[in-house]
Amino acid sequence: HPTFRPPRVIRAMPPYQITRIGWGYFTVQAYIILKAGYTWISEDAQPTPDGVEKGMLPLEWMLSFDGDGSMGRCRLKYKHEISAEDSDSSYDDDSEYEE
């Protein structure tokens, strides 16, 4: 959010969380970018900034500092492309995240 400093945060290693003190409510946008060799199995997936097809998944939710927030869990699928040296196939795996 533009009122936070810094307004944009990138987390490349666990823990994938941030803590802020504030008031009110607003929509938070997050983008989950998979490491090289992985792609999302989702119609919502987008290309990453460096052009990897379906490597980025946009998420958004309403954040409330008034105690009206919610938590949810989603099961998401991704694909890992195995190099030709390892195998000629790819496999699907399930991934979870919590809001």
Image: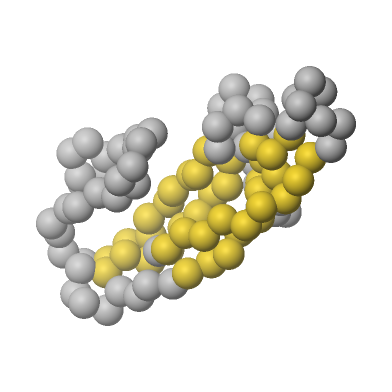
Please determine whether, in this image, residue 13 is positioned above or below residue 42: above
**Quadrant location of the C terminus?**
bottom left
- Residue 90 image-quadrant placement: top right
Q: Position of residue 57 (x, y in %)?
A: 57, 47
Find the residue positioned furthest to the right: 88
- Residue 36 image-quadrant placement: top right
Can I make out residue 37 in this image?
yes
Q: Nearer the viewer, residue 40 or 79?
A: 79
Residue occupying the point 81% across, 30% down: 87
Q: Nearer the viewer, residue 61 or 15?
A: 15
Residue occupying the point 58% across, 64% down: 75
Apparent side of residue 72 relative to residue 9 in the rendered image (left or right): right
Residue occupying the point 86% across, 31% down: 88
Q: How is the image coloured?
A: secondary structure
Apparent side of residue 14 relative to residue 98 in the rendered image (left or right): left
Q: Position of residue 50 (x, y in %)?
A: 59, 22
Find the residue positioned furthest to the left: 21
Please determine whether, in this image, residue 80 is positioned above or below residue 28: above
Apparent side of residue 67 relative to residue 75 in the rendered image (left or right): left
Can I make out residue 54 in this image?
no
Apparent side of residue 47 relative to residue 6 in the rendered image (left or right): right
Residue occupying the point 47% across, 69% down: 73
Find the residue positioned furthest to the bottom: 68
Total numbered labels placed on residues in the image? 0
Q: Where is residue 6 in the image (x, y as percent from the top left)?
A: 22, 36
